[in-house]
């Protein structure tokens, strides 16, 4: 969804905030951890059915996720552990958000009222994790794998956009996320297959 130009433009917008955090002495790992707890808050708000506020809090967690890397580079605190912590807490953050969505459909609507809600929440979490895992596993094998639409920023954007308009619109946005994230994971699978396949 995002072009490289858009990503660079977004980075320029966040640069002054990152510089301010450097001046204030904020440590990147602390910001990463804070972003995780903000995501847990978003998951709780989804659970309680407060979709608009969940959207705002989820957006805040996305900003933390975007800033921690810039903060690490700006403060010369880029570390292997920091990268590992960021990636790990990103996954836990997504689990927390989708758990909140699952609990909303489970407790507020029930299987009889909304038979697909719980399933979509589970599939959305699974597909999101597989998109991230496929890239991480490919990079562990020495292959770069950034193909596909639904990376973490795009997934957050889609969830935020749907939640702003309430539970009814969000349900259909969740459908879209499941389809697009699953397609992205499969796209990465076939991309790595084509890159590593030996000529016959």
Image (tube, grey):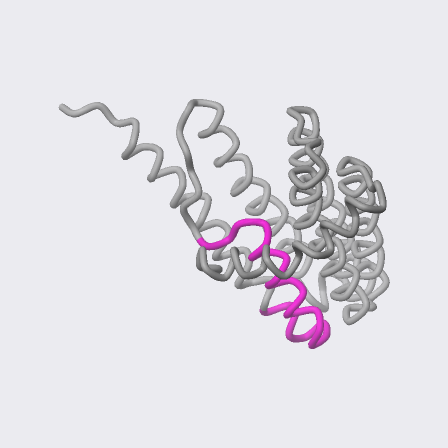
Q: Residue at x 76, y 41 (%)?
A: 32
Q: Residue at x 55, y 46 (%)?
A: 127
User: Whole-percent x and y of residue 177?
Assistant: 55, 59
Q: Is residue 32 above or below residue 110?
A: above
Residue in the foreground of this view, choosing between 54 and 177: 54
Position of residue 126 in the picture relative to residue 82 (left or right): left
Predominant SS along the magenta part: helix
Q: Residue at x 44, y 30 (%)?
A: 138
Q: Is residue 193 above or below residue 151?
A: above
Q: Is residue 164 magenta?
A: yes
Residue range in magenta is 149-172
Q: Is residue 55 above or below residue 34?
A: below
In the current view of this chain or complex, which residue is farthest to the front? 23
Residue in the foreground of this view, choosing between 36 and 76: 76
Question: Which quadrant holds the C terminus?
Answer: top left
Q: Residue at x 67, y 61 (%)?
A: 117
Q: Is residue 76 above or below residue 115?
A: above
User: Whole-percent x and y of residue 54?
Assistant: 78, 63
Residue in the foreground of this view, choosing between 129 and 4: 4
Q: Is residue 127 magenta?
A: no
In this orientation, does residue 189 appear? Answer: yes
| The image quarter in which residue 43 lies | bottom right
User: Whole-percent x and y of residue 47?
Assistant: 82, 59
């Amino acid at each position: 969804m995002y072009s490289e130009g858009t990503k660079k433009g977004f980075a320029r917008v966040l640069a002054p905030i990152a510089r301010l955090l450097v001046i204030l002495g904020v440590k990147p790992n602390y910001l990463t951890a804070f972003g995780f707890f903000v995501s847990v808050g978003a998951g709780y708000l989804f659970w309680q059915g407060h979709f608009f506020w969940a959207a705002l809090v989820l957006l805040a967690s996305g900003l933390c996720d975007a800033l921690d890397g810039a903060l690490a580079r700006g403060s010369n605190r880029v570390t292997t552990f920091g990268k590992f912590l960021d990636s790990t807490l990103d996954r836990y953050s997504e689990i927390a958000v989708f758990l909140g969505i699952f609990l909303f459909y489970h407790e507020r609507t029930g299987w009889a009222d909304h038979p697909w809600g719980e399933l979509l929440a589970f599939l959305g979490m699974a597909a999101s994790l597989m998109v991230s895992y496929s890239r991480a596993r490919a990079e562990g094998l020495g292959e770069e794998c950034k193909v596909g639409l639904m990376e973490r920023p795009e997934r957050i954007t889609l969830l935020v956009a749907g939640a702003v308009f309430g539970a009814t619109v969000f349900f259909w946005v969740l459908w879209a996320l499941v389809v697009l994230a699953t397609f992205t994971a499969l796209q990465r699978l076939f991309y790595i297959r084509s890159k590593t396949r030996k000529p016959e």
